[in-house]
Structure formats: C-alpha cells, structure tokens
Amino acid sequence: MKNTTLCYIENDNDDYLMLYRNKKKNDPNAGKWIGIGGKFKEGESPEECLLREVYEETGLTLLEWKLRGIVTFVSNEWETEYMFLYTANNWSGELTDCNEGSLAWKHKSEFNNLPMWEGDKIFLKLLREQNDFFSLKLSYEYQRLIQVVLNGKNIDL
C-alpha cells in the first residue's frame, strides 16, 4: 500500500493548476490531467510530502493549504493507495517547468471535458460543492471505475 498527496492550487479566476502527464515513461497517469503531488518519502508527514511535491513539480512554495479529504484507491492492477487531498490558494514563487508533464491553469468548468480518471472527476466535484472533510473510496477494475463509496456509503455510478 502506498501513501500520496494531491493538491489543487486555485487562483482568483476559479482555475486549478493542473498537470498533463506526458513526459514520464511507464506512467499510469499518461495522457491524463491531474493535480500536483506524489508519493511520500520515508518518514514524511502528509504536509511535508505536499510541500515538497508542490515545490518539485511547480517551483511554488505553498503558504496556506487545507486538507479536504482522504481518497482510497483500490484496483486489480495496482497496490492500494491512500491519497491525502488538499486545496491551496496562497503561494509564493514563479511557476517552473515540470519533468513529469505540462502545467496549465484549467477553469473548473472544463473538468468534464478533460482526459482524466473518472474518480478524479468525482472528488473534483466534491471539492467544488462542499467544504466538509470527506472520505472517498474509488475501486477500479482494469482502469474502469466500478465502485464509489463516500463517507462509508455506496454511491450509484
């Protein structure tokens, strides 16, 4: 099982900073838009991982952030993943190139038209529609979303 962080950095135009994964070999996220984040290093807290990953991938230093949820990914093709999901709206620094893909500000209204994991669309909708902390379980079979459980309750697909 692995632990990761993912952050959606928001600007004043109702955009999130997104990463189009198109530079890494053997990338399970290749061809998809995702937030900014990655795997914990040994001994890191979620916040330490968040700050390191955001800086490594964007050149930005987060000044304020909020833990919005924990997402559990289950699949028949990869190990279970626990992802700490954050949003942030205050940072310093200048955006730099990312060695994992192309960074771009994407308006929230574009999300349903972007190539991304189906489960990502669900937690992006939750980020937009509610402020409460949530627990979300997304189960995949051969990269197809087959089950969604929000705060312990099954959600119809």
Image (cartoon, rainbow, N blue to C red):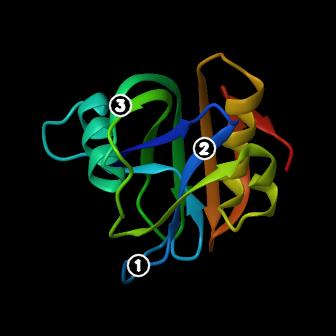
Residue at point 63%, 61% (across, down): 140
Residue at left offset 59%, top offset 62%: 33
**Disc sitting over residue 62 in the figure:** 3
Horizontal and vertical percent position of residue 114? 73, 64
In the image, 139 versus 92, the foreground residue is: 92
**Residue 11 place in picture, x, y as percent:** 58, 35
Q: Is 118 drawn above or below residue 28 in the view shown?
A: above
107 or 27: nearer the viewer: 107
Residue placed at 51% from the left, 38% from the top?
9
Write down the quadrant of residue 97 in the picture: bottom left
> Mark 2 falls on what kind of element?
strand
Q: Earlier in the sequence, mark 1 or mark 3?
A: 1
Q: Percent position (x, y) of residue 81?
A: 43, 50
Tag 3 secondary structure: strand
- Residue at the left extreme, as displayed: 43
Residue 41 shows up from this direction:
yes
First of labels 2, 1 by sequence position: 2
50 horizontally vs 80: left or right: left
Question: Looking at the picture, which amino acid does disc 3 mark?
Answer: Leu
Q: Position of residue 26 (x, y in %)?
A: 39, 82
- Say which residue label 2 marks: 16
Q: Earlier in the sequence, mark 2 or mark 3?
A: 2
* Residue under numbered circle 1: 23
Is residue 98 positioned above or below 26 on the image? above
The three-letter amino acid code for the residue at tag 1 is Lys
Q: CA distance from mark 2 to mark 1?
A: 20 Å
Task: Estimate how packed mark 3 is, as few (under 14), some (14 to 19) or many (20 or more) residues with alpha carbons within 10 Å.
Answer: some
Where is residue 127, by image quadrant?
top right
Vertical placement of 39 versus 8: above or below? Answer: below
Badge 1 density bin: few <14, some 14–19, many ≥20, Cα 10 Å? some
**Residue 49, quarter of picture:** top left
| Residue shown at 75% from the left, 38% from the top | 125
